[in-house]
Amino acid sequence: MSSVENFTDVTYEVEDGLAWITINRPDRYNAFRAQTVDELVLAFKTAWGDKNVGTIALTGAGEKAFCSGGDQKQRMETGDYGPSESGLFEVEALHRVMRDVPKPVIAAVNGIAIGGGHVLHVLADLSIAADTATFGQNGPRVGSFDAGLGSGYLARVIGEKRAREIWFMLRRLSAEEAMDWGLVNKVVPAAELKDEVRDWAKTMNSYSPTALKVLKQSFNTDTEQFVSIGNMAYTTLNMFSETAEAQEGINAFNEKRQPDFRAHQA
């Protein structure tokens, strides 16, 4: 894979200074495998290096899903998220590039944003949601977690109590509830989502790109420690995923039953 023209899991297009990055796996609710993540990283870097791009929008193909996180069917089939360019599952690199790209990133949340997909929308600088979108986490149900940016930064966005409710209770939020919680910037009818994103991008593209770059870097400074915490947590998650407790979560998910974690209580 050497360019965006070779993508299979993601589409990339630029219109009027706005780069659209679309996860194109609607048959898997736009869940990402390792190849998807590779393509997303390259798409963001392509937008970063393009002087004709001032803003970036991340969305999902179809009407049902923005992104449902890591592809659990892939994990069930192969025991991992499939092959990647580097041999690594580069999701931390994806989080990093979304924060580091010196251009505003808008999450155009067109459907469910769950698990790792929810983390992606949280990491975007701005989130605009269709009125049909839903939000939430899934980790503790499937024997997984996202420390660092996925939890600590989320608490900065919406507050400690609400962030803990999302993670401990796996509360699902409607678009209007997400708006009320401060999790998204605006909710619009689904048919108007892309036009709304275009309007916001047009406004930002009329401003000084250097000013926006420095402002983004300034906003990021206060939460930078969550990146290293996330790296440490990802190391832990890799080890935890091999345990019987984690395996019970993923098996129950794929078998469409409630997991039984009673044997693993401390």
Image: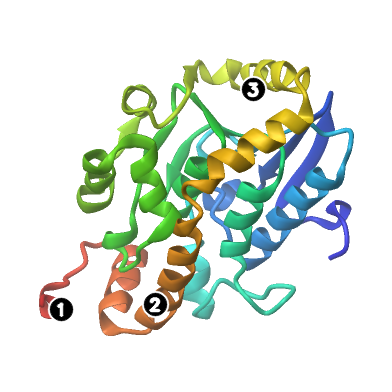
Check disc 3 and report its element: helix, strand or loop.
helix
126 lies left or right of 136:
right
User: Which amino acid, mark 2?
Assistant: Thr
Task: Work out how far the residue at label 2 is from the one at label 3, CA to CA, in angstroms.
Answer: 37 Å
State the image coordinates of residue 77 (x, y, percent, origin top left): 51, 75
Task: Work out how far the residue at label 3 is from the one at label 1, CA to CA, in angstroms.
Answer: 45 Å
Check disc 1 and report its element: helix, strand or loop.
helix
The residue where tag 1 is placed is: 264
Task: Work out how far the residue at label 2 is from the one at label 1, CA to CA, in angstroms.
Answer: 17 Å
The residue where tag 3 is placed is: 197
190 lies left or right of 230:
right
- Mark 2 and mark 3 lie on one chain; the one further toward the N terminus is 3
State the image coordinates of residue 4 (x, y, percent, origin top left): 84, 52
Check disc 2 and report its element: helix, strand or loop.
helix
Q: Quadrant of the N terminus?
A: bottom right
Q: Which is nearer the eye, 88 or 154? A: 154
Taking 6 as reference, is 52 above or below it?
above
- Mark 3 and mark 1 lie on one chain; the one further toward the N terminus is 3
Front: mark 2 or 1: 2
- Crowd class of label 1 (few under 14; some 14 to 19; many from 20; radius 10 Å): few
Front: mark 2 or 3: 2
State the image coordinates of residue 64 (x, y, percent, origin top left): 50, 37
User: Which amino acid, mark 1?
Assistant: His
For the point 74% across and 18% down, which residue is it? Answer: 202
For the point 39% across and 77% down, which residue is it? Answer: 236
The reply to whether dot 3 and dot 1 touch (C-beta < 8 Å) is: no
For the point 76% across and 56% down, which residue is it? Answer: 42
- Mark 2 and mark 1 lie on one chain; the one further toward the N terminus is 2
249 lies left or right of 263:
right
Q: Which mark, by number, is residue 236?
A: 2
234 lies left or right of 257:
right
